[in-house]
Amino acid sequence: MTSSTMPINESDAKSSAIARAKRLAPDLAARIGSTPATKFRGNPDIFGRLVADHDEHRALIAMIEQTSGDSPDRRRLFDEMVKEMQAHAAAEEQALWSVVLRNPDTTEHGRHAVAEHKQIDDLIEELQEADMASPGWLRRFAALKDKYLHHIREEEQEQFVAAEQHLSEADLTHLRAVFNRRKQAEKAMAA
Ligand SMILES: [Fe+2]
Ligand SMILES: [Fe+2]
């Protein structure tokens, strides 16, 4: 095992994800509280990598909730959250869901996750068009938050679990590398 494929412990994995989000606004608290149980946090495969992103997104959401009005913090955090979520979703589709969709035993799981990505995109678009200074913006943000937290909990507890049963160790390691490569490319395109 090389150091990059070594499992790290769950709470370290979670704190480093939160620390990554906090770099954008160190003065804001990022309290994500207890997260839904998952066996993948800290794993050296694609699922551990995806959960690390999910935790970072949970932290960004918690930080945005602490901002008010059309402030520089809210703008910066929201823009980063959108880029992060969209690059994550695109790379997740290219690396993981495409493989899961190809297998008739897991097609339905892949379809479910990808359909939710579309719903999340629509909620993001509504927020981008709404006035950040209005109270309605936070209400819409709460709707996105609910949908997104539901989506990543379900991935961690249901779709990843189903996908894992049909993938070999080698697949899982390979998919992590594909995900990392694709996410970097997607984020560069969004910049
Ligand atoms: Fe997803
Ligand atoms: Fe995900």
Image: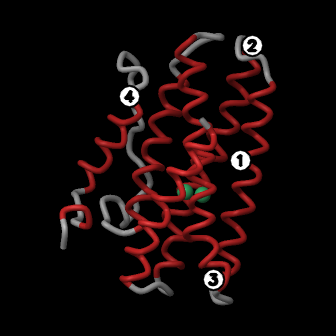
Q: Secondary structure at mark 1?
A: helix
Q: Are marks 4 and 1 in contact (CB under 8 Å)?
A: no
Say which quadrant the C terminus sits in. Answer: top right
Disc 4/disc 1 C-alpha distance (Å): 23 Å
In which quarter of the view is residue 67 placed? top right
Q: Is residue 134 left or right of residue 159?
A: right
Disc 2/disc 3 C-alpha distance (Å): 42 Å
Dot 4 corresponds to which residue? 22
Q: Nearer the viewer, residue 41 or 46?
A: 46
Q: Nearer the viewer, residue 73 or 63?
A: 73
Residue 36: numbered disc: none
Q: Residue at x 57, y 59 (%)?
A: 91
Q: Residue at x 21, y 65 (%)?
A: 6
Q: Nearer the viewer, residue 95 or 181?
A: 181
Residue 134: numbered disc: 2
Residue 136, compared with residue 41, is above or below; it is above
Q: Residue at x 40, y 29 (%)?
A: 30
Name the amino acid, label 1: Ile
| Relative image position of residue 64 (x, y in whole percent) | 54, 25
Q: Are marks 2 and 4 in contact (CB under 8 Å)?
A: no
Dot 3 corresponds to which residue? 106
